[in-house]
Image (cartoon, grey):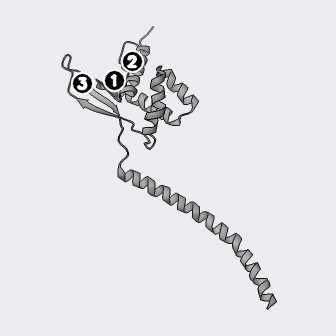
Amino acid sequence: MPTPKKGPRLASSPAHERLMLANMATSLFQNGRITTTLPKAKRLRPLAERLITFAKRGDLHSRRRVMRVIRNKSVVHMLFTQIAEMMEQREGGYTRITKIASRHGDNAQMAVIELVTEPLSAKKATVAEAEAATKVAAEKEAEAPVAEATEAPVEAAAEAPAEKAE
């Protein structure tokens, strides 16, 4: 069977690479951060972020799709309950890769990949809060003229018989 030509693999076969990435994703969600080589960290990032996006959805289909990759049920439960709750306000960028010193034995580039646990910046949180307040105010304004329009004819009708009586 010919070797795949799509691009460089981290391991000897696509199946081995898939299993290796699944194990690294499991370790990342269990521990919050892992130290690995830079190419492995760069290949792990899109997989981990996609799994977190599924966890944020929280439905049964998403849970089953995550279970295809992560076989440990306790890690999947933690991903759907704790990690998805932490990442609720974020729209992406759930992981961070930080380069560290090269490995002593073979001089391989090393990196730390970790989950971003800090809350969003105060500026973004303020902007989101202001947008929500503006939306609520706009909805109240849209409802207010409708209520006034229905009340106005009633008041005019009440005044008209009063004028006839005089």
Q: Nearer the viewer, residue 165 or 157?
A: 165
Alpha-carbon span between mark 2 and mark 1: 9 Å
Mark 1 or mark 3, which has the lower sequence index?
1
The N terminus: image quadrant = top left
The amino acid type found where label 1 is placed reads Lys
Image coords of residue 86 (percent x, y): 42, 39
In the rendered structure, are the residues bearing label 2 and label 1 in contact, judged by CB atoms less than 8 Å apart? yes
Crowdedness near tag 2: few (<14), some (14–19) or many (≥20) residues, C-alpha within 10 Å: some
Helix, strand or loop under label 2? helix
Q: Which residue is disc 2 drawn over?
A: 20
Q: Which mark is residue 109?
A: 3
The C terminus: image quadrant = bottom right
Up/down of 123 relative to 47, above or below: below
The residue positioned 62% from the left and 67% from the top of the image is: 144
Mark 3 or mark 2, which has the lower sequence index?
2
Q: Which residue is disc 1 drawn over?
A: 40
The amino acid type found where label 2 is placed reads Met
Up/down of 9 relative to 160, above or below: above
The residue positioned 40% from the left and 21% from the top of the image is: 21
Up/down of 86 relative to 47, above or below: below
Q: Is 102 on the left or on the right of 26, as rendered?
A: left
Image coords of residue 4 (percent x, y): 42, 15
Alpha-carbon span between mark 1 and mark 3: 10 Å
